[in-house]
Image (cartoon, rainbow, N blue to C red):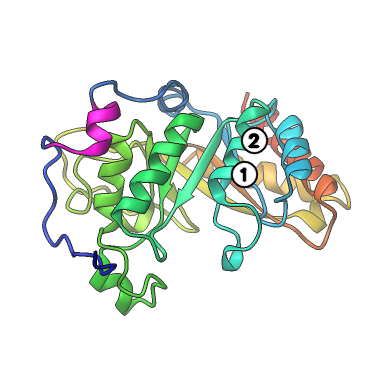
């Protein structure tokens, strides 16, 4: 059997036979995905990105116990260079401790079969949402320096469709959330710095938005002034039309795993209290 992936230049049918559709396609969202989708319809959403260095089983359990009570979801991204525990393993540890989890899913060196398997595993774990990494297809990704090296045979929009079919709530970064990029619409848009662009004309209301706020954890650990600045920034962000909450993106600052999680929890708690 050839190991070379066959490109899918056209959108595959969402109604045709498919491994994920056969397994879950008629069941709708998983329980956690449905809870999170419902939560995005109300303001005051508070999520945090867990630094990739917080990656041992013990550190993840500590993070879940500290963060679970004060945030709506913990976001996990791929560790740099793919080192450490696998992304789905890390998600499973957090879920076992009761934390809701958003997983960033990219294509790297994986083809459709591998990605379907990961989506199925994440559905079994019952994650809150899948955030599709940016990109518009194998050709565009290669031009942009995507490390997949031509192995991945799916566009990001096709991966989003597969994620929805697997039962996930689907989030996308703001740069590729226009109507022409995804069909159907994503459930949530994640904004970077700056103002959101005007939504394209669409027959349905635009998806809610989550604003990313970078947080220097070293500064925040040194006193309340830095935390007050984050709270003020979160208030400003949520005043923008369509923004339902914030994603606090912590920068580790060379601290220990337990201290990182405790600092993020303290910041998230202050932001949640201010939004109550």
State the residue position of label 2: 94
The residue most toward the front is 1
Q: Residue at x 25, y 40 (%)?
A: 185
- Provide residue 161's location: percent of width, then percent of height: 25, 43
Q: Residue at x 55, y 53 (%)?
A: 77
For marks 2 and 1, give the CA distance.
Answer: 6 Å
Q: Quadrant of the C terminus?
A: top right
State the residue position of label 1: 90
Q: Quadrant of residue 236?
A: top right
Dot 2 surroundings within 10 Å: few (below 14), some, or many (20 or more)?
many
User: As rendered, which of 116 and 105 lies closer to the eye?
Assistant: 116
Q: Residue at x 38, y 70 (%)?
A: 148
- Provide residue 55's location: percent of width, then percent of height: 70, 51
Q: Are marks 2 and 1 in contact (CB under 8 Å)?
A: yes
Q: Is residue 49 left or right of residue 194?
A: right
Q: Is residue 47 left or right of residue 188?
A: right
Secondary structure category for the residue under label 1: helix
For the stretch drawn in magenta, what is the main secondary structure? helix
Determine whether 198 is above or below 187 in the image: below
Report whether residue 243 is seen: no
Q: Quadrant of residue 97?
A: top right
Q: Is residue 70 left or right of residue 73?
A: right
Determine whether 207 is above or below 86 in the image: above
Q: Which region is colored magenta?
A: 17-25
Secondary structure category for the residue under label 2: helix
- Provide residue 252's location: percent of width, then percent of height: 74, 58
Q: How many marks?
A: 2
Q: Residue at x 32, y 59 (%)?
A: 111
Report whether residue 11 is seen: yes
Determine whether 55 is above or below 268 in the image: below
């Amino acid at each position: 059997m050839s190991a070379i992936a066959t490109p899918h230049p056209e959108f595959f049918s969402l109604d045709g036979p498919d491994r994920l559709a056969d397994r879950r396609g008629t069941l709708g969202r998983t329980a956690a995905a449905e809870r999170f989708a419902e939560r995005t319809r109300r303001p005051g959403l508070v999520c945090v990105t867990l630094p990739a260095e917080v990656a041992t089983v013990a550190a993840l359990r500590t993070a879940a116990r500290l963060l679970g009570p004060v945030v709506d979801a913990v976001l996990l991204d791929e560790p740099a260079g793919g080192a450490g525990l696998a992304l789905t393993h890390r998600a499973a540890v957090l879920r076992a401790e009761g934390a809701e989890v958003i997983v960033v899913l990219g294509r790297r060196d994986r083809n459709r079969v591998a990605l379907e398997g990961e989506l199925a595993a994440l559905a079994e774990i019952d994650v809150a949402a899948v955030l599709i990494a940016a990109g518009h297809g194998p050709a565009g990704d290669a031009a942009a320096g995507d490390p997949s090296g031509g192995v991945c045979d799916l566009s990001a929009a096709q991966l989003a469709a597969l994620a929805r079919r697997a039962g996930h709530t689907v989030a996308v970064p703001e740069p590729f959330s226009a109507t022409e990029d995804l069909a159907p619409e994503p459930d949530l848009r994640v904004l970077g710095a700056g103002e959101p662009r005007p939504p394209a004309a669409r027959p349905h209301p635009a998806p809610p938005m989550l604003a990313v706020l970078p947080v220097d954890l070293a500064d925040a650990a040194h006193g309340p002034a830095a935390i007050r600045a984050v709270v003020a920034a979160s208030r400003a962000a949520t005043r923008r039309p369509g923004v339902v909450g914030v994603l606090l993106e912590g920068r580790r600052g060379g601290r220990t795993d337990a201290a990182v999680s405790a600092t993020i929890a303290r910041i998230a708690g202050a932001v949640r209290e201010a939004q109550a």
